[in-house]
């Protein structure tokens, strides 16, 4: 199962993370880079 479908899933996941990263970077720290508490604090 790793050979088939994996590249597409990774690609889609990467796009999702990139979009989330851009949205979060506009608001403040990213969930991936820093704790969610900081993000909630800033909001």
Image (cartoon, rainbow, N blue to C red):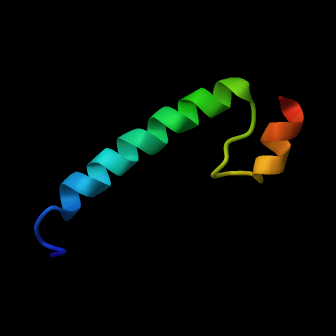
Identity of the residue furthest to the right in this view: 41
Give x and y (percent) for residue 40.
82, 39
Q: Is residue 38 left or right of residue 34?
A: right
Q: In this view, which residue lies farthest toward the bottom?
A: 1
In the picture, measured across the screen, residue 9 lies left or right of residue 26, that is left
| Quadrant housing residue 24 | top right
Instruction: Say above or below: 13 vs 18.
Output: below
Q: Position of residue 13 (x, y in %)?
A: 37, 50
Number of callouts in the render? Answer: 0
Residue for point 84% across, 44% down? 38
21 versus 7 height, above or below: above
**Which residue appears at 89% of the width and 38% of the height?**
41
Q: Quadrant of the N terminus?
A: bottom left
Which quadrant of the figure contains the C terminus? top right
Q: Where 39 sits versus 13, above or below?
A: above
Residue 7's spot in the image, x, y percent?
20, 58
Q: Residue furthest left?
A: 4
Residue 6 image offset from top left, x and y in percent: 21, 64
Displayed quadrant of residue 9: bottom left
């Amino acid at each position: 199962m790793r050979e088939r479908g994996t590249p597409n899933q990774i690609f889609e996941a990467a796009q999702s993370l990139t979009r989330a990263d851009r949205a979060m970077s506009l608001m403040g720290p990213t969930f991936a880079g820093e704790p969610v508490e900081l993000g909630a604090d800033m909001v």
